[in-house]
Image (cartoon, grey):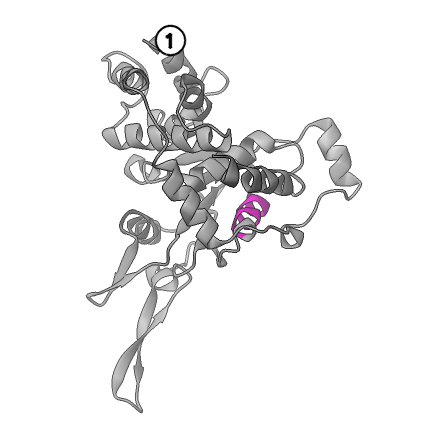
Amino acid sequence: MGTMNSPVQALIAAIGQVLLGKEHQVKLALACLLARGHLLLEDLPGTGKTSLAEALSRGFGLDFRRVSFTSDLLPADLTGLNVFDSQRSRFDFHPGPLFSQVLLADEINRASPRTQSALLEAMANGRVSVDGISHPLPEPFLVIATQNGLDQGGTAPLPESQLDRFLMRLHLGFPTREAERDLLQGQALQAAQLASELTAAHLQALQQQVQTIHTSPALLDYVLDLLARSRDSGRPGLPLSPRAGLALLAAARAWSLIAGRDHVLPEDVQAVLTPVCEHRLDGGQIRGEATLSSRLLGAAGGLR
């Protein structure tokens, strides 16, 4: 575990120079990437959502594209389209921005439901179909979507089925007073200045290593207890699906790898429970401090 863990910790420290005072959120975002999941960032404008997305991609030397999800964005603007070549009398496929290793879908909830669905279909299948021909997306492939608060004008909430395609939802929040002082003094790096020795091959090796992290039968029972409690009749919120259970376990494995362990502890599950499950439990609504996931965790009790 130690051979890979040192570069990972160096990357966390490097991204921490871009997002000051946000080490916990950086670790969660990295865990999402290592678990092969897609990430939804929801917060006010100007809190560092774009900087985090760009820093993660640069940290692994990944191809990065950004698309603003305006109301007039069409599915073909994402997937690409076939263009007729008159000289060769044939149609050639011109790939769209989806064909990048990291796609930042900026303000996803401002686009039409049809365009949102085109993106989320690609996230689910790892490929797109244009005029009946399937085109595989690059490996690795990660979507980082940003979403403004639903109380802002011109926004449309994502349906629960589409929210479920995101492994995690994170809120960055405001920096601490000390971190914001450093920011005002110009001590934060720009994402373009981030230097890292990691590559896409390192990322794929880490993603494979995450799948080998050991989970004991007792740990699996703990996860099953959490899923079962969410499905109890009379409890507030939506029940967690089997896909949510797989996402929770994958994220917990990634969190334990970041911590340098080869096995999952209950604390790993607890660390990722809210970002993995909150948007699934509450259908995209923010419940405040007494979150549904924290109440679910309390109800499930300790490890059996």
- In this view, the residue in front, 60 or 136, is 60
Q: Would residue 242 be found to the left or right of residue 34 on screen?
A: left
Q: Quadrant of residue 250?
A: top left
* Residue at the far right in the pictured view: 185
Whether residue 231 can be seen here:
yes
Q: Magenta segment, principal secondary structure?
A: helix
Vertical order, 237 against 85 (above or below): above
What amino acid does circle 1 point to?
Gly
Residue that numbered label 1 is attached to: 302
Q: Would residue 179 be found to the left or right of residue 3 on screen?
A: right
- Indicate the position of residue 60 as horizontal and vertical percent values: 52, 51
Whether residue 104 can be seen here:
no
* Residue at the far bottom in the pictured view: 87
Identified at 67% across, 36% down, the residue is: 20
169 magenta-colored: no
Identified at 42% across, 54% down, the residue is: 71
Residue stretch rendered in magenta on the structure: 48-57
Q: Would residue 150 be found to the left or right of residue 192 on screen?
A: left
Image quarter where the C terminus lies is top left
Identified at 29% across, 13% down, the residue is: 235
- Indicate the position of residue 219 as horizontal and vertical percent values: 33, 18
Task: Give the SS element for disc 1.
Answer: loop
- In this view, the residue in front, 238 or 39, is 39
- Indicate the position of residue 162 as horizontal and vertical percent values: 31, 40
